[in-house]
Image (cartoon, grey):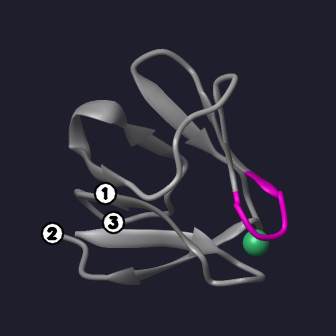
Amino acid sequence: MIIIKCAKCKEKIIKYVKLGKGNVHRCYKNRIQKYYVQLNNKELKCPICGKLIGSDQGNYIKINHHTFTYSGTIN
Ligand SMILES: [Zn+2]
């Protein structure tokens, strides 16, 4: 389980079950455990700085490079 945060503010965005190695590019909705920020207009934005972290692509959320950091354990 990892927590994806805004790279700048460290504000929590989503809690996600990450499987396998590699970078986080897509967060599949069925593995998102918690939304700290609600999707608005198919966008996930940092509530503090307003940076666009991810965008809704249907069954997954595309996470933008260089906008986030994460903490936690990759399963
Ligand atoms: Zn921010």
Q: Secondary structure at mark 1?
A: strand
Give the x, y percent position of residue 50.
Answer: 83, 58
Q: Which mark is residue 35?
A: none
What is the span of residues highlighted in magenta in the rendered image? Answer: 46-52
Residue at which label 2 appears = 75
Q: Amino acid at mark 1?
A: Tyr
User: How would you classify the magenta stretch by its main secondary structure?
Assistant: loop
Q: Secondary structure at mark 3?
A: loop
Give the x, y percent position of residue 2.
Answer: 32, 71
Q: Residue furthest left?
A: 75
Residue at which label 3 appears = 21
- Whether residue 28 sits left or right of residue 53 in the image: it is left
Q: Is residue 52 above or below residue 5?
A: above
Who's the residue at 82% across and 58% down the image? 51
Image quadrant holding the C terminus, namely bottom left
Q: Amino acid at mark 2?
A: Asn
- Crowding around mark 2 (Cα neighbors within 10 Å: few <14, some 14 to 19, many 20+) is few
* Residues at marks 3 and 2 touching, judged by CB atoms closer than 8 Å: no
Give the x, y percent position of residue 59.
Answer: 39, 20
Give the mark nearest the N terminus, 3 or 2. Answer: 3
Q: Secondary structure at mark 2?
A: loop
Q: Is residue 75 above or below residue 63?
A: below
Q: Is mark 3 within 8 Å of ligand 1?
A: no
